Image: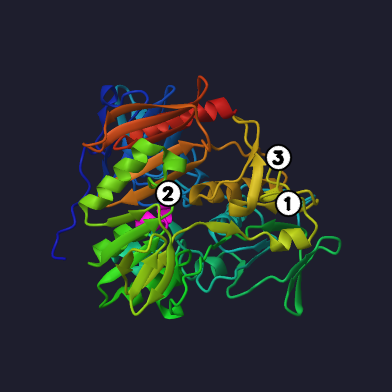
């Protein structure tokens, strides 16, 4: 709104910079002509790539260099410095490569380099057709990865959603808050799927899988497959509130859900959020941004204590209270009458709408009916393969062997789903790549972002470094002497380093 776009700044690589300014293991951001470029020196080699992460344009110069890779400080995407390729989500598009030269004691960037062509694959042994059930993070990422890995066979996405694959985390964050325009939400443009030969069928609910015949049923239609990827996601839990009109009660999972809540909030004054989960608290923040009075009711005494611990949960509660959110903890909603909700202790809360953030259930019906091994999720091996040959499962439904705990785990996080989609796609093509990424998620609350790496359903102790009051701290979770997870606020580089440390323990 009236702002002048600033051009690239920093040293001009076109005229060269001293080699001494390009420090080993560091990134130097500058320009080549009127475009931003980042030069990285690592292990005696020098690379030049575009400096913005392809997820949310995070500043890669502030990220972590590990060998010939760079990791984004915001949401932990990882890219190859050699090819620009996305190695790990959420940055799905590749970085732009630039030609870089060393002449004596100076470094020059001379122009854009040709993108590496898709990997050439022999068709021998490859599936002719891949069917993906689910158009969320895992399914969409798998389809994109298949094409970027050089697969030329048929790719079909059967999605029950009404929208093309979109940025689901934003549904409870900036989009719901009214800060993110609609054009931010799609993962790819409308023409991407057509141009890349991916058949995307929306509003399509799969009714059955015939493992023996290798067919997927959609009503009276069937889709034959050589390889099948199940990425059916999860369904939000809806708890009963006696007397509450259907028009006043919302769950929050899809883009359509977010749109409905935003529309319902127009002209309203009060909202009740049921559940102090990440979704519940993010919805509370977003509705406060829209100017509503917000109350959060939840059965626990401290928000997210089971996931983050009492200390960090208390910090989040105080942060929301500073922004006007009221809490009714240790209570659940019982009934609603004439815009007033009665809680389990008999107290009452005025509310024009109710948003539920009380968790989700994995969509396992298809897998169960197909006879796949299922136990609190679809059981998969380290390659994301199910108990049936030619069928893989990823995302919220997948329960895989965790290298650190030695147990099977199921994690309902966006980046986990995307990374599993990448791995499964490569394994569908015969690569045999183990899934050993460290679970990662982020959660936004006003001007604070929590980054969490690892997986700690239980822990013996926590170690806290920093000041909760200033919003600059780190919480380490331990089982015995072993660090199993790290949560940070205001320490992006430390979060990346913790991820790398845990990752090395995973492998």
The tag on residue 309 is none
Q: Please name the residue that numbered disc 2 is placed on.
A: 300
Looking at the image, the residue that sits furthest to the top is 481
Q: Is residue 127 above or below residue 452?
A: below
Give left or right: position of 321 versus 280: left
- Crowding at dot 1, Cα within 10 Å, few <14 / some 14-19 / many 20+, comes out as some
The answer, for residue 66, to whether it is visible in the render is no
> For the residues marked 3 and 2, what is the alpha-carbon distance in whole angstroms?
43 Å
Q: Of the residues under marks 2 and 1, which one precedes in the sequence?
A: 2
- Image quarter of the N terminus: bottom left
Q: Position of residue 48 (x, y in %)?
A: 38, 38
From the viewer's side, name the closer residue of 257 and 6. Answer: 257
Q: Position of residue 288 (x, y in %)?
A: 26, 62
Q: Of the residues under marks 1 and 3, which one precedes in the sequence?
A: 1
Task: Name the mark nearer the viewer: 1 or 3.
Answer: 1
Task: Name the mark nearer the viewer: 2 or 1.
Answer: 2
- Crowding at dot 3, Cα within 10 Å, few <14 / some 14-19 / many 20+, comes out as some
Q: Is residue 187 above or below residue 219?
A: above
For the residue labelled by badge 2, is the local secondary structure a helix, a strand or a loop?
Answer: loop
The tag on residue 432 is 3
Looking at the image, the residue that sits furthest to the right is 212
Q: Of the residues under marks 3 and 2, which one precedes in the sequence?
A: 2
Q: Magenta region: which residues?
A: 275-282
From the viewer's side, name the closer residue of 101 and 289. Answer: 289
């Amino acid at each position: 709104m009236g702002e002048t776009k600033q051009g690239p700044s920093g040293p001009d690589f076109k005229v060269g910079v001293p080699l001494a300014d390009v420090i080993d293991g560091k990134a130097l951001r500058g320009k080549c002509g009127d475009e931003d470029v980042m030069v990285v020196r690592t292990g005696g080699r020098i690379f030049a790539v575009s400096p913005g992460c392809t997820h949310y344009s995070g500043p890669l110069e502030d990220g972590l260099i590990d060998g010939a890779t760079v990791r984004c400080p915001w949401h932990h995407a990882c890219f190859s410095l050699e090819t620009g390729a996305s190695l790990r989500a959420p940055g799905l598009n590749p970085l732009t490569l630039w030609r870089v030269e060393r002449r004596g004691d100076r470094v020059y960037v001379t122009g854009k380099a040709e993108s590496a062509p898709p990997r050439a694959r022999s068709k021998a042994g490859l599936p002719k057709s891949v069917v993906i059930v689910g158009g969320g993070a895992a399914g969409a990422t798998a389809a994109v990865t298949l094409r970027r890995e050089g697969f030329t066979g048929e790719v079909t996405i059967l999605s029950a959603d009404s929208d093309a694959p979109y940025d689901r985390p934003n549904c409870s964050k900036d989009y719901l808050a009214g800060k993110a325009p609609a054009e931010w939400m799609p993962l790819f443009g409308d023409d991407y799927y057509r141009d890349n030969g991916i058949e995307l069928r929306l509003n399509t609910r799969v009714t059955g899988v015939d493992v023996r015949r290798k067919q997927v049923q959609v009503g009276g239609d069937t889709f034959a497959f050589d390889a099948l990827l199940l990425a059916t996601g999860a369904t939000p839990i809806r708890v009963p509130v006696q007397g509450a009109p259907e028009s006043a009660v919302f769950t929050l999972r899809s883009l359509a859900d977010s749109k409905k809540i935003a529309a319902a909030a127009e002209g309203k004054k009060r909202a009740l959020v049921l559940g102090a989960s990440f979704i519940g608290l993010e919805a509370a923040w977003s509705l406060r941004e829209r100017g509503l009075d917000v109350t959060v009711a939840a059965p626990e005494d401290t928000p997210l204590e089971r996931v983050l611990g009492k200390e960090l949960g208390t910090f989040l509660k105080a942060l929301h209270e500073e922004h006007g959110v009221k809490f009714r903890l240790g209570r659940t909603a019982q009934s609603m009458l004439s815009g007033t909700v009665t809680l389990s202790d008999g107290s009452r809360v005025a509310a024009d709408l109710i948003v539920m953030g009380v968790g989700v259930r994995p969509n396992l019906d298809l897998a169960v009916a197909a006879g796949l091994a299922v136990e609190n999720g679809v059981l998969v091996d380290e390659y994301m393969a199910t108990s049936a040959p030619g069928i893989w499962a990823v995302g919220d439904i997948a329960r895989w062997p965790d290298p650190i705990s030695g147990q099977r785990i199921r994690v309902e996080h966006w980046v986990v789903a995307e990374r599993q989609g990448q791995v499964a796609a490569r394994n569908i093509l015969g690569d045999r790549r183990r899934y050993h990424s460290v679970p990662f998620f982020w959660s936004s609350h006003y001007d604070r972002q929590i980054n969490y790496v690892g997986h700690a359903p239980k822990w013996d102790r926590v170690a806290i470094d920093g000041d909760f009051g200033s919003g600059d701290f780190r919480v380490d979770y331990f089982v015995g002497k072993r660090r199993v997870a790290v949560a940070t606020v205001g320490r992006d580089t430390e979060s990346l380093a913790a991820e790398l440390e845990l990752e090395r323990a995973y492998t």
